[in-house]
């Protein structure tokens, strides 16, 4: 039996996908799956939830400020530079392994990340193709849809930006695609977050934004740019006097002190994210494992613990990682995650091995290889 999760700090997902980038759907039906027809039935299925930054994508110091264009450079796929000049990369082998999991293994892949709307829209052509994309602390869920899906009765209408996968050696899934939003999930989140829009905080409705205004009155600077279902309080954005005491702010909300009913929060890299309590990586993943593997039937035999694999690296992944069948970590970016891995009490496995040169993208490849092997063992192959 696993230890209780009650002592584990809750987590977050950040970021969002702007409505201009997506097309929205009001049906609960998923767009046509592009996965292998050999996927096991619901009760035998497996699913992978993967973080992006620090897990699939890494940021080598040598590439900071690099003028290299986005795309394939040797064995690496370079992403467009961030607003701060950081250059993310993932290996071509990582892309191939994710593709193999979906196409050959029949394993749905879900990306859960904190990237903002503009960042995600710019990154979609370079990231592994996924069966779902989750953002804004789990507050929004999107599915890819290609032109071949036009006849599918999912309630959606084509529109918005179309992502064209950037070619790489071995690419076999290069069809352009747009995104449709899960409106059933969105409706649940809007009960607390209010209608999704880009109005100033002072004009937004919902308990989430009421709390944001309370923090503003205390002098805190709120990062709401591009968010509809969450907001962030970043140490770097605070006035000097509040920045000096920000550790106390983080400690207080790590203990959930002062968090209003119906809201939750999590900490990560000097920030605190707030969002509806029905949201969060774990709860978003619970919804998806049932919808994708269990066809939305609420099948008790389909759960994160029985069917979910996770790839992650930081505090904002803890709750999801501990709820899954197994979790693999290509790197460790927090002391709390390091302590959990070191305790040996949880099915958390570090693939980084600095002494043997297994770091960053290679550690990610090892994690995916091990997951592939474990799933094959699960199925008796």
Image: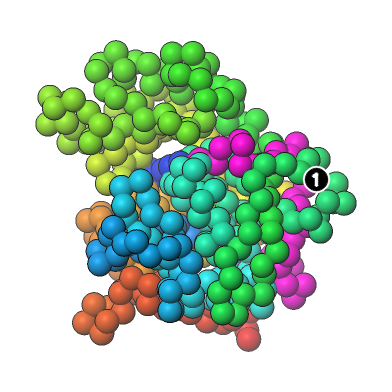
Q: Main secondary structure of the magenta part?
A: loop
Residue 318 location in percent, x, y? Answer: 38, 53
Residue 138 location in percent, x, y? Answer: 51, 42
The magenta region covers 16-44
Q: Is residue 3 visible?
A: no
Q: What colour-coding does the image apply?
A: rainbow
Residue 309 placement, left or right of 33: left
Residue 212 location in percent, x, y? Answer: 38, 21
Q: Is 235 placed above or below 178 here?
A: above
Residue 369 placement, left or right of 3: right
**Count of numbered tags:** 1
Q: Is residue 51 visible?
A: yes
Residue 311 found in image quarter: bottom left
Residue at image x 71%, y 67%?
Answer: 35
> Is 46 one of the magenta-colored residues?
no
The residue pinned by badge 1 equals 154
Residue at image x 44%, y 19%?
Answer: 201
Residue at image x 29%, y 24%?
Answer: 221
Mark 1 packing: few (<14 Cα in 10 Å), some, or many (20+)?
some
> Is 40 one of the magenta-colored residues?
yes
Residue 369 placement, left or right of 58: right
Q: Is 176 placed above or below 20 here?
A: below
């Amino acid at each position: 039996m696993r230890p209780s999760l009650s002592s584990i700090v809750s987590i977050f997902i950040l970021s969002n996908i702007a409505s201009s980038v997506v097309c929205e759907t009001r049906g609960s039906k998923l767009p046509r799956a592009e996965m292998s027809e050999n996927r096991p039935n619901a009760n035998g299925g497996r699913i992978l939830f993967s973080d992006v930054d620090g897990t699939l994508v890494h940021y080598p110091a040598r590439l900071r400020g690099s003028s290299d264009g986005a795309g394939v450079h040797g064995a690496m796929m370079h992403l467009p530079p961030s607003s701060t000049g950081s250059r993310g990369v993932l290996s071509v082998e990582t892309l191939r392994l994710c593709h193999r999991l979906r196409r050959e293994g029949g394993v749905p892949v879900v990306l859960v990340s904190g990237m903002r709307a503009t960042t995600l829209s710019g990154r979609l052509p370079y990231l592994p193709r996924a069966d779902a994309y989750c953002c804004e602390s789990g507050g929004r869920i999107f599915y890819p849809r290609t032109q071949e899906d036009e006849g599918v009765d999912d309630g959606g209408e084509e529109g918005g930006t179309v992502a064209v996968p950037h070619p790489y050696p071995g690419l076999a899934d290069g069809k352009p695609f747009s995104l449709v939003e899960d409106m059933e999930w969105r409706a649940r989140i809007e009960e607390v977050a209010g209608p999704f829009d880009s109005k100033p905080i002072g004009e937004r409705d919902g308990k989430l934004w009421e709390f944001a205004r309370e923090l503003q009155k205390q002098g805190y600077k709120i990062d709401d740019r591009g968010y509809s279902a969450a907001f962030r309080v970043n140490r770097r954005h605070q006035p000097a006097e509040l920045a000096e005491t920000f550790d106390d702010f983080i400690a207080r909300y790590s203990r959930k002190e002062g968090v209003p009913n119906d809201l939750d929060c999590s900490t990560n890299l000097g920030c605190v994210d707030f969002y509806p309590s029905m949201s969060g990586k774990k709860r978003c993943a619970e919804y998806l494992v049932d919808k994708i593997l269990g066809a939305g039937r609420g099948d008790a035999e389909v759960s994160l613990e029985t069917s979910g694999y996770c790839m992650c690296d930081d505090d904002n992944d803890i709750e999801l990682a501990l709820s899954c069948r197994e979790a693999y970590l290509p790197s460790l970016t927090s002391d709390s995650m390091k302590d959990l891995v070191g305790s040996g009490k949880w099915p958390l496995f570090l693939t980084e091995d600095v002494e043997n040169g297994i770091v960053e993208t290679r550690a990610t490849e090892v994690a995916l290889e091990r997951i592939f092997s474990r799933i094959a063992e699960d199925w008796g192959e």
